[in-house]
Amino acid sequence: MDRPFLSVSTGLLKGMAQHKERESPREIILGSCAEHGEDAVIDFAIAVLAGEVTTEEAFTTEVERLKWLVGPIVGGWAKLDPVNFYWARVWAARTFLYVWRDDAVDALLVAADDPAWRVREHVARVTAQRELGQLVDALVPLLYHDLPRVRAAGVRALGAAGEYEHLEAVRELRDDPDGTVRAAVERAVDRLAIRLDREVD
């Protein structure tokens, strides 16, 4: 079962906020690529997503490499309940918003069925940004998620990388109770029409 919200200590949140002011995720990833090599960073992110490196390992024996994806603040997370260790997979998926290699698709396909909704949400974000049609079918279930932000991410992914057969699933959310989702649907339908060069209404 998804855990929509998890308790994180106030001190850790403050530390994350301060770190965020110093470096953005993009800066952290690109800086790690410059220091350790892009292939090394991508290899680690893929290994975490594919389960070759477990989340427990990521926060313990592999924590120095996990810092490549999120920065030094990650050291504090090892003190949390292991249920929070799924964040390693969130950060691994997020990596592919900033760097890319084609073999990441297979790992992202595995992550599209991750038990943590934040991981699946990030797979959808990467799919939308990079127009990864190979992942679209695996992301259709996001349209029926309880959280509006996850439904919206799924809609954006289908709009960016889907085909005509995905249109009906997107349209079903036109009357979604959340305004963000409804807006995402309208943009996705428009984007599908442009991408597919055909009438969709």
Image (tube, rainbow, N blue to C red):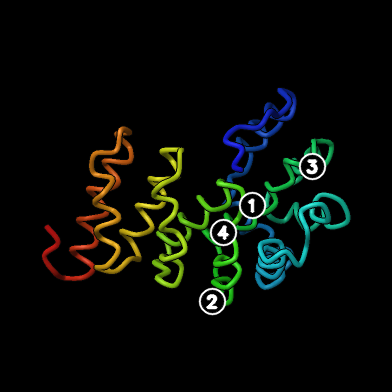
Q: Nearer the viewer, residue 198 or 168?
A: 168
Q: Secondary structure at mark 3?
A: helix
**Number of the label disc, if any, that sits on residue 91:** 1
Q: Are marks 1 and 4 in contact (CB under 8 Å)?
A: no
Q: Is residue 118 depicted above or below 54 in this figure? A: above
Left of 22 or right of it: where is 157? left
What residue is drawn where x is 72% and y is 64%?
51
Which-is-in-front pick, marks 3 and 4? 4
Q: Residues within 10 Å of mark 4 (few under 14, many from 20)?
A: some
Q: Amino acid at mark 2?
A: Asp
Q: Earlier in the sequence, mark 2 or mark 1?
A: 1
Q: Earlier in the sequence, mark 2 or mark 4?
A: 2
Mark 3 — residue?
82
Q: Residues within 10 Å of mark 3 (few under 14, many from 20)?
A: few
**Number of the label disc, if any, that sits on residue 113:** 4
Give the x, y percent position of residue 136: 41, 65
Q: Nearer the viewer, residue 120 or 102?
A: 120
Q: Are marks 3 and 1 in contact (CB under 8 Å)?
A: no
Mark 2 — residue?
102
Which-is-in-front pick, marks 3 and 1? 3
What residue is drawn where x is 43% and y is 40%?
149
Q: CA distance from mark 2 to mark 4?
A: 19 Å
Give the x, y percent position of residue 83: 74, 41
Q: CA distance from mark 3 to mark 4?
A: 20 Å
Q: CA distance from mark 2 to mark 3?
A: 31 Å
What residue is drawn where x is 72% and y is 70%?
40
Residue 45 sits in which quadrant? Answer: bottom right
What residue is drawn where x is 68% and y is 28%?
7
Give the x, y percent position of residue 53: 78, 63
Q: Amino acid at mark 4?
A: Asp
Q: Nearer the viewer, residue 109 or 190?
A: 109
Q: Are marks 2 and 1 in contact (CB under 8 Å)?
A: no
